[in-house]
């Protein structure tokens, strides 16, 4: 096993997180020059300032940094094309870690060859955003259960009302979690903690803590007809595209709540709008949409039963530290000859 690991930091990383990597794994040598990466607009802004450009000299220095590394932290410039160039320019490169949980989509677009994917293992930050996304999923279901939109409207009109409005209780609801990966498991835990009955989809059939009933993925529509809320946590792949579509949404009971904290492509948005208009979906809280940014002309913006968050539910000040600690743990595994965590599938790219 190598005695040290040269790691090129290909995206902006704060000093504290860089120091945390060195603290946890002193055998890592970070190749890092903050002047060569797009500065953050907020904590964990891996894409960085959109207007950032390198001078020719800076680009040469950045390319040299990537070419001298055994591993890369972050997809260079968060660009599939830049990733492909980095892999092909450095035969020593053996590991790339994506700062996104769903970084596999960018790796797929890089169109690396089978040999390149065999040489360079890719790991993702899956699970690092689970707690923040789970909180947002709870918020979305609560917003629907407590009729947030009507409360906002009444407050804007200074309207107290003539009667007391009944509200739904999460403890009396059945919540279907579509996807029991790193995020879905934490979502299930949070809802179970609130007293909800939790169902979850499965391909493996393996029991999952806090899940009262496992639902085979091909029985999703039948399950949707029996629950009060559906929370989508799945990544965007060819297998998941449009999975929550007309069949599933058409089977939903009136006033079902839908929350999506996975990928926007998993939900068929035209079918969702039909279900919202028909009242089968009484409320939808969407942190993600099929096209991002969501086009201004989309009906989702103005629909009275939709709450939009601009793909920000995962963000927190703790995110960079968590990802740095995951990276350091994997660096230790690599240096000690142990299997890495969160290895991306080269077939489904997640």
Image: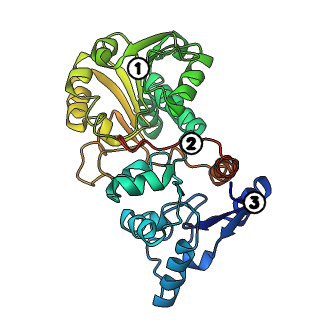
**Residue tagged 2:** 129
Disc 3 packing (10 Å; few <14; some 14–19; many ≥20) = some
Labelled disc at residue 201 = 1
- Above-or-below relation of 124 to 245: below
Question: In this rendering, does residue 36 appear at all?
Answer: yes
Q: Looking at the picture, how far across and down is residue 107, in whole percent?
A: 39, 54
Q: Position of residue 275 (x, y in %)?
A: 23, 26
User: From the viewer's perspective, is 61 left or right of 116?
Assistant: right
Q: How is the image coloured?
A: rainbow
Q: Is residue 254 visible?
A: no
Q: Left or right: where does residue 184 sit relative to residue 115?
A: right
Q: Residue at x 24, y 48 (%)?
A: 298
Q: Provide the residue designation for mark 3.
A: 27
Query: Dividing the picture into quarters, in which one does residue 135 lie?
Result: top right
Percent x, y of residue 274: 20, 30
Measure the alpha-carbon separation of dots 2 and 1: 20 Å
Q: Earlier in the sequence, mark 3 or mark 2?
A: 3
């Amino acid at each position: 096993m190598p005695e040290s690991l040269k790691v090129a930091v290909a995206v902006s990383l704060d000093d504290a997180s860089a120091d945390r990597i060195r603290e946890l794994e002193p055998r890592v040598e970070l190749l890092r020059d903050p002047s060569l990466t797009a500065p953050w607009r907020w904590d964990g802004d891996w894409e960085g300032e959109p207007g950032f450009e390198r001078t020719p000299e800076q680009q040469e220095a950045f390319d040299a940094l990537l070419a001298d590394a055994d591993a890369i932290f972050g997809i260079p410039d968060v660009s599939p094309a830049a990733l492909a160039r980095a892999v092909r320019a450095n035969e020593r490169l053996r590991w790339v870690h994506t700062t996104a949980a769903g970084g596999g989509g960018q790796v797929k677009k890089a169109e690396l060859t089978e040999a390149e994917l065999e040489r360079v293992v890719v790991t993702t930050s899956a699970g690092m955003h689970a707690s923040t996304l789970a909180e947002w999923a709870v918020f979305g279901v609560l917003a629907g259960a407590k009729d947030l939109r009507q409360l906002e409207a009444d407050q804007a009109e200074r309207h107290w009302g003539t009667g007391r409005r009944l509200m739904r209780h999460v403890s009396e609801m059945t919540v279907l979690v579509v996807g029991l990966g790193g995020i879905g498991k934490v979502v299930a835990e949070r809802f179970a903690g609130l007293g909800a009955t939790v169902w979850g989809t499965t391909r493996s059939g393996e029991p999952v803590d806090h899940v009262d009933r496992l639902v085979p993925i091909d029985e999703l529509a039948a399950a949707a007809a029996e629950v009060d809320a559906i929370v989508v946590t799945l990544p965007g792949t060819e297998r998941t595209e449009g999975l929550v579509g007309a069949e599933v949404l058409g089977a939903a009971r009136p006033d079902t709540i839908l929350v999506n904290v996975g990928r926007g492509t998993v939900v068929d948005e035209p079918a969702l709008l039909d279900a919202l208009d028909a009242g089968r979906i009484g409320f939808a809280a969407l942190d993600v949409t099929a096209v991002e940014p969501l086009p201004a002309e989309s009906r989702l913006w103005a629909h009275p039963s939709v709450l939009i968050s601009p793909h920000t539910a995962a963000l927190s000040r703790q995110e960079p530290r968590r990802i740095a600690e995951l990276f350091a743990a994997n660096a230790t595994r690599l240096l000690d000859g142990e299997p890495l965590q969160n290895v991306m599938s080269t077939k489904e790219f997640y």
